[in-house]
Image: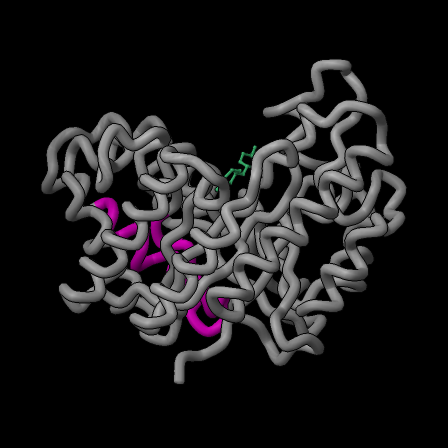
Amino acid sequence: VAPTIAAPARRRVPFGGAIQAEHFDVDPEYRKAFLTYCDLIMPMNELKFDLLRPSPDVFSFEPADRIVDFALSHGKGSRGHCFLWWGGTPDWVKAITDPKRLEAVLIEHIETVADHYAGRLTSWDVVNEVIANDPPQEGALRDTHWLRVLGPRHIPLAFLTAAKADPKARLVINDYDLEYVGPRCDARRATMLAMVRQLKDAGVPVHAVGMQGHLYADLQIDHDAIAAFGAALKAIDVGLIVSELDIIDWHIEGGPAEQDAAAGKAVNALLDAVFAGQQPEAVIAWGLTDRYSWVGGAMPRPDGTPVRPLPLDEHYRRKAWFGPLLDRL
Ligand code: XIL
């Protein structure tokens, strides 16, 4: 039986939150909220390649260590995000165009980081967002530095290296826009499924898919496709995690009440669909409070009013949809 990703949870399915060191340090209410609601507390950005390793010889483990220690010392689980991501690739890595050298960097990075956290981070997003944003055909991968220099083999290489460095870790492939109705998400789901099958057939250890769950509240969740996707993964013994849940409400008109109603509907529809395929290994919110979220910066509301992406509002009050979400885990 595969290990679960969290310390023994109060819930059947652990509920998690991604936390940011810069707020953790100055806002005690923020820390308290994670302790109150989460079974699993994970660093949001601190383990990304560029922040962790700003130059070849510097591993700045300290900010992530503080978060992981905080989680574990309070009896919570934690997990790692992420070894390889197009968005977190530092310039010094992008300057390496020799495949042999880049391969050596990939292996050294994963070995060092996995080893540092072995036994503390029980699960890792090994590769993040490797599927083409808008796949022109099924199977298309995103154009990243890793792909350009090493080809698709960097994906199995990353998983095999992680498995060797931390044989007990649960290894996850994480991606976005796997949630909605339409040909683009159909292609992204098919690509993910084909890739996971291919990796498994080749003996590469992939234990779960992370479905990010950055939910556009105005798009329709594809219940049947998600249920079929989860069931197909289950059939090959691969788990499913809702890994970065939040709600993008930029096209929801009205005000806070309408935004929250739309968010609750979206979250509910996603969980219905996920549970119809298989019981998820965890549901993790990408932050916890509207006080701090990437959504307001990346996808602001056209009318300039605040976004409301997360389970707690900016004053740490629970949204009406948060209780029902926890109740089903
Ligand atoms: C985002 C963080 O939330 C921001 O704080 C940071 O500035 C940029 O990255 N998909 C992912 C996450 O896999 O790593 C991203 O996180 C959001 C989209």
> Magenta segment range?
105-127
The reply to whether the magenta stretch includes residue 119 is: yes
Frontmost residue, 278 versus 83: 278
In the image, residue 23 sits, relative to residue 3, either above or below, namely above
* Residue 117, percent from left and from top: 45, 64
Residue 242 position by quadrant = bottom right
Outermost residue to the front: 224
Frontmost residue, 99 versus 202: 202
What residue is drawn where x is 79% and y is 40%?
Answer: 260
Asked whether the viewer can see residue 269, the reply is yes
Asked whether the viewer can see residue 46, the reply is no
* Residue 320, percent from left and from top: 85, 51
Tell me: 214 left or right of 158.
right
What residue is drawn where x is 60% and y is 35%?
Answer: 216
* Residue 43, percent from left and from top: 58, 51
The reply to whether the magenta stretch includes residue 19 is: no
In the image, residue 120 sits, relative to residue 176, either above or below, namely below
Tell me: 313 left or right of 107.
right
Tell me: 62 left or right of 126.
right
Frontmost residue, 161 versus 283: 283
Q: Where's the C terminus, which quadrant?
A: bottom right
Residue 93 position by quadrant = top left
The image's colouring method is one colour
Ligand 1 is found in the corner quadrant, namely: top right
How many circles with numbers are drawn on the protein?
Answer: 0
Residue 58 position by quadrant = top left
What residue is drawn where x is 20% and y is 30%?
Answer: 96
In the image, residue 324 sits, relative to residue 318, either above or below, namely below
